[in-house]
Image (cartoon, coloured by chain):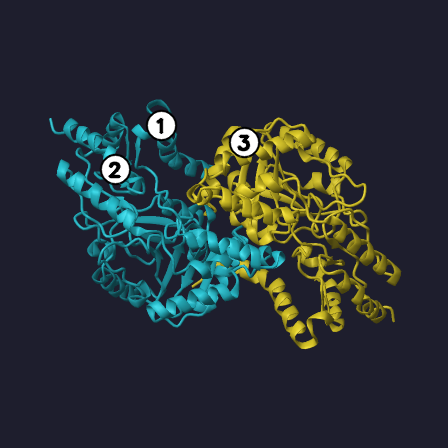
Chain colours: A cyan, B yellow
């Protein structure tokens, strides 16, 4: 006896689940090394050694009841202050501990933010292609997701379509930069235009429209690319962060939401975030990881490994005749599928033991996502399969 | 711009928050040792030494990407199997890994269970006095909480009132044994009667009515008392468990929900729990703690420390003329307040630096909760204050 709403969630979930199960079956049948599983965004690079050192340190040096006891629902004050000081140093903000709620990853950060701001039927804009979980998170609070297709040449948001999509029900905009599934970084120009539109629309409709900037890939930026800091462009901004990718610890569920001080109703909103974290059932982020953060917040996985994967895979795809932009961040490529029907295309890819995800799963048909957080060998060894796939559709 | 629903949650939260803040202020003013803070259920006994040993072991012996990477949303299969085998050994069940979803504590376990079973306006019965968060958790999924007052002589549920409260909207019953705030263990007789009523009502209304047994205090049982195993009495049972109290690690957020195999729609329900854990924003329980569980699942804090606190405080209260039953579990006493107005009574207690929580906060006015998870010295030193409080209302 599962609720109707839950059944809707379950239907949406079965596609990815099916692929996951199929991948496992294929690995069994053909051998793990002969299956090129590009389907999952599970970090492949090792956590920096400082993570282990910090874990051992806090375990050995903290009184157990203090280390494992209840913190404030928003997290330990000194850890939040540490986060604020880092932001102030790097971004010139004037944050303090009150700007932060430490959460069980970005997923919880997004959920408590949406829980705080959404009335039923309120609309939240997302830019397609987008991370599919946004649909569920928004639905959790009876909000309505409004996908707005990006410019598929650049995968920057289309400003005309964006402005047209805003109405009096619009309460938030989720952006994700560097982006899953495209890897693209939103430019300063994009953020400037977005801010201008939102400021105008806030005035027109007489209420705040928040940007919720989902930034788990913030540290995965390659070459000379620079990631603009969203609160520099727009006051009503939440940042949802996770250490999952920067430290390769996605199973540990540690991140935060940071509310920009200049946002409307800052004090009420941050008090609400604290309460939402508690009553949503998260209660607080795992305390051992809260204590680890100050020791590792300057560390990162070796992003050169991902960069090498990106370059190798990108060059290989271009050489084989695929059409794809070269993004500056995250660990995804998002090439055009060789036929219009991206679901059929990804189905066909399985013939060659290639597991890639249809763009439709991200609200953007005609493309597919390749998660290159895999071993370098997987990329090299998959060339033949990508070639066969290309040949299949070049006849 | 906080949503209306969120504002309701915030109003309800302010009472406990106010007491927490007041406690901190009082400690500052009078010195920590002169304030007897019985307000919080924060475990005072040290975690068993095996917790630290297991943490170090899993950190040193597990490959980092494996230790910190994404598990199945329900948790590592081998860890779930371990939980099943323990249940089979101790309770004679025939569970396997599919019965379990490992969660970020009992709070997440309760939330995903309610998310799975509740349609909007569905009713969930709780027995007053009850843990206040149940109200929020049920409200998260637009359910309606239906408090049914227990027999205040024994704090066992009142079966007549229980049966009367069930109607076609009733989808679940949350029980909490050993109980917060009374410390009482529900007897086998209680569970037998409850089951008889529910089986009859399920038939009458043609759908499952689930018992959700919230058991974070399961290991805190004193003397010869025995805690009955709920699925022995009733098929449609979920168990929500947390290691917070048994291991004194409440900040770490690790527990599970266990769905009884014989429940209606077992397979769909457990699949839904897995998905609810993901989309609810929990994603999975912290992996390092999942890996620790198999090494510590037979361990427990030294419950003799709590037992000594219970005996000392209980005897002291009775000697001073308070009226209180002597419960067999958890770390709470729930005496009658000396005046009808329990809020005024707890306010008066503050004059003597005693922080205790009004029964009204648990839906049971005329009583107050004393959380004796404090140092033994606190109990001894608070005697004079309890005496003065008694004298104040004996004139």
Left/right of residue A394 with respect to residue A375 in the rendered view: left
Q: Which mark is residue A27?
A: 1
Q: Residue at x 21, y 46 (%)?
A: A311
Q: Which mark is residue A267?
A: none
Image coordinates of residue A267 in percent, x first then y, are 46, 68
Image coordinates of residue A187 in percent, x first then y, are 22, 59
Q: Secondary structure at mark 3?
A: helix
Q: Are marks 1 and 3 in contact (CB under 8 Å)?
A: no
What residue did someone put label 2 on? A379
Q: CA distance from mark 1 to mark 2?
A: 16 Å
Quarter the C terminus of chain A occupies: top left
Q: Residues within 10 Å of mark 3 (few under 14, many from 20)?
A: some
What chain letter is assigned to the residue under label 2?
A
Q: Is residue B108 visible?
A: no
Q: Secondary structure at mark 2?
A: helix
Q: Nearer the viewer, mark 1 or mark 3?
A: 1
Q: CA distance from mark 1 to mark 3?
A: 22 Å
Front one among A125 and A29: A29
Q: Nearer the viewer, mark 3 or mark 2?
A: 2
In the figure, A86 relative to B143: above or below? below
Left/right of residue A164 with respect to residue B332 in the rendered view: left
In the figure, A88 relative to B232: above or below? below
């Amino acid at each position: 006896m599962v609720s109707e709403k839950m059944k809707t969630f379950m239907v949406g979930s079965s596609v990815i689940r099916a692929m996951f199960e199929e991948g496992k079956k294929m690995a069994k049948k053909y051998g793990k090394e002969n299956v090129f599983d590009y389907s999952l965004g599970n970090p492949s690079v090792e956590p920096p050694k400082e993570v282990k050192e910090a874990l051992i340190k806090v375990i050995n040096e903290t009184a157990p009841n203090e280390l494992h006891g209840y913190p404030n629902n928003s997290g330990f004050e000194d850890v939040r202050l540490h986060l604020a000081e880092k932001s102030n140093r790097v971004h010139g903000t004037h944050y303090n501990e009150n700007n932060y709620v430490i959460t069980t990853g970005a997923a919880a950060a997004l959920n408590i933010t949406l829980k705080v701001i959404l009335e039923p039927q309120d609309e939240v804009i997302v830019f397609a292609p987008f991370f599919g979980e946004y649909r569920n998170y928004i639905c959790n609070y009876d909000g309505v997701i409004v996908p707005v297709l990006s410019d598929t040449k650049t995968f920057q948001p289309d400003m005309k379509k964006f402005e047209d999509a805003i109405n009096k029900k619009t309460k938030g905009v989720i952006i994700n930069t560097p982006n899953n599934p495209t890897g693209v970084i939103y430019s300063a120009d994009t953020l400037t235009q977005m801010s201008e539109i939102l400021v105008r629309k806030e005035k027109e409709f007489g209420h705040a429209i928040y940007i919720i900037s989902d930034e788990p890939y913030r540290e995965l930026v390659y070459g000379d690319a620079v990631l603009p800091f969203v609160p520099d462009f727009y006051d009503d901004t939440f940042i949802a962060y996770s250490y999952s990718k920067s430290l390769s610890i996605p199973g540990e569920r540690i991140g935060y939401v940071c509310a920009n001080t200049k946002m409307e109703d800052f004090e009420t909103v941050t008090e609400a975030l604290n309460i939402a974290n508690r009553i949503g059932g998260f209660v607080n982020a795992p305390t051992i990881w809260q204590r680890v953060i100050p020791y590792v917040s300057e560390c990162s996985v070796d992003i050169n490994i991902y960069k090498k994967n990106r370059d190798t895979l990108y060059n290989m795809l271009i050489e084989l005749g695929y059409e794809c932009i070269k993004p500056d961040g995250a660990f995804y490529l998002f090439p055009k599928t060789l036929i219009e029907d991206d679901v059929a295309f990804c189905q066909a890819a399985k013939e060659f033991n290639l597991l890639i995800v249809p763009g439709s799963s991200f609200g953007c048909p005609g493309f597919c996502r390749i998660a290159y957080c895999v071993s370098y060998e997987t990329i090299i060894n998959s060339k033949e399969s990508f070639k066969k796939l290309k040949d299949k559709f070049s006849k």
